[in-house]
Image (spheres, rainbow, N blue to C red):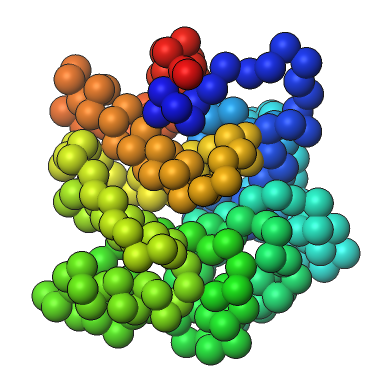
């Protein structure tokens, strides 16, 4: 984290720190995409736009006035936002119905190979049944963030059979980074290397925790420009759990919003030690 979370140059503007687009949050699950967007804002993203159901507009602007709203059913506005983004998050609260699949296809098939795409939640379940989308994501800078059941759906590997060897074989076929969320979260990289967390714990077992992680990954990728971007993914995943562990010293349960609200001070601490 000391190597990745750098102090900001004096001559900076919001465009230097990433244009992030989060897509998700149907009328029933707006909180998921709001947490993802909020995490991206608090983790330092320069510009955050949230493409979501129009019913989430008031809540979004009340909770994150820094974020811009896009109606994800408006094709013109959505495509414009996709083209303007450096990093996209698709999936938190998106749902798994026909409308969700339509939006997912529209987003993925209109991205380019210079953009980062973080695929999370129900978007993983939908992608698992869409060979065209899997192929499109294989030639992009894609990060999947499944829990073990979502990984089972995407990989075809039953939870009981998931090990590093089997997971790596499937991950290489997908051509993407896999952040497998579990006890000792494991990250499978495109070069075949593996990272595993030793921080975090059961106090993180709360709805919205993964949505918050996607926002942190997006913000880190948008503002920290390393040749090997997967080092930045490692840092973001580690920061998410390390901060939760720090907060757990005085909390029985750590909420996603606890992490979001503590991100700025946590990152500041490491930026002072950056080299």
Q: Residue at x 81, y 51 (%)?
A: 84
Question: Does residue 240 lie above or below 164 as drawn?
Answer: above
Q: Could you say where residue 119 lies in the image, as x and y percent from the top left?
A: 51, 63
Residue 47, located in which quarter of the rendered image? top right
Please name whichever residue, 137 or 160, is drawn nearer the observer in this view of the structure.
137
> How many numbered marks, from 0 up?
0
Q: Could you say where residue 239 lies in the image, as x and y percent from the top left?
A: 37, 33
Q: Is residue 147 visible?
A: yes
Q: Could you say where residue 14 lies in the image, as x and y percent from the top left?
A: 75, 28
Horizontal arrangement in the rendering, residue 187 relative to residue 64 (left or right): left
- The quadrant of the rendering that contains the N terminus is top left
Q: Residue at x 63, y 18 (%)?
A: 8
Horizontal arrangement in the rendering, residue 53 relative to residue 257 (left or right): right
Horizontal arrangement in the rendering, residue 70 relative to residue 116 (left or right): right
Please name whichever residue, 23 or 83, is drawn nearer the observer in this view of the structure.
83
Question: Does residue 208 lie above or below 172 as drawn?
Answer: above
Outermost residue on the left side: it is 160
Residue 142, located in which quarter of the rendered image? bottom right
Q: Residue at x 49, y 26 (%)?
A: 5
Please name whichever residue, 268 or 264, is drawn nearer the observer in this view of the structure.
268
Q: Residue at x 74, y 51 (%)?
A: 85
Q: Is residue 218 visible?
A: no
Residue 226, located in which quarter of the rendered image? top right
Horizontal arrangement in the rendering, residue 268 relative to residue 199 (left or right): right
Q: Could you say where residue 19 lies in the image, as x and y percent from the top left?
A: 72, 42
Question: Does residue 98 lie above or below 188 as drawn?
Answer: below
């Amino acid at each position: 984290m000391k190597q990745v979370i750098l102090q900001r140059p004096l001559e900076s503007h919001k465009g230097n720190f990433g244009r992030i687009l989060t897509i998700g949050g149907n009328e029933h699950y707006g909180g998921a995409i709001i947490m993802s967007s909020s995490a991206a804002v608090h983790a330092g993203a320069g510009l955050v736009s949230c493409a979501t159901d129009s019913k989430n507009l008031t809540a979004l602007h009340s909770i994150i006035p820094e974020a811009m709203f896009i109606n994800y059913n408006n094709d013109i506005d959505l495509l414009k936002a996709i083209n303007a983004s450096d990093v996209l998050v698709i999936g938190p609260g998106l749902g798994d119905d026909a409308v969700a699949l339509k939006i997912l296809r529209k987003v993925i098939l209109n991205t380019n190979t210079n953009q980062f795409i973080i695929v999370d939640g129900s978007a993983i379940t939908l992608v698992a049944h869409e060979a065209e989308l899997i192929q499109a994501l294989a030639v992009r800078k894609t990060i999947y963030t499944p829990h073990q059941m979502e990984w089972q759906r995407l990989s075809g590997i039953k939870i009981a059979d998931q090990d590093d060897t089997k997971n790596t074989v499937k991950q290489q076929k997908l051509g993407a980074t896999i952040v497998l969320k579990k006890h000792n979260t494991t990250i499978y990289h495109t070069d075949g290397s593996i990272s595993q967390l030793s921080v975090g714990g059961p106090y993180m077992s709360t709805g919205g925790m993964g949505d918050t992680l996607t926002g942190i990954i997006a913000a880190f990728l948008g503002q920290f420009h390393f040749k090997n971007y997967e080092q930045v993914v490692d840092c973001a995943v580690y920061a998410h759990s390390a901060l939760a562990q720090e907060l757990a010293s005085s909390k029985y349960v750590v909420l996603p919003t606890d992490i979001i609200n503590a991100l700025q001070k946590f990152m500041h601490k490491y930026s002072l030690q950056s080299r």
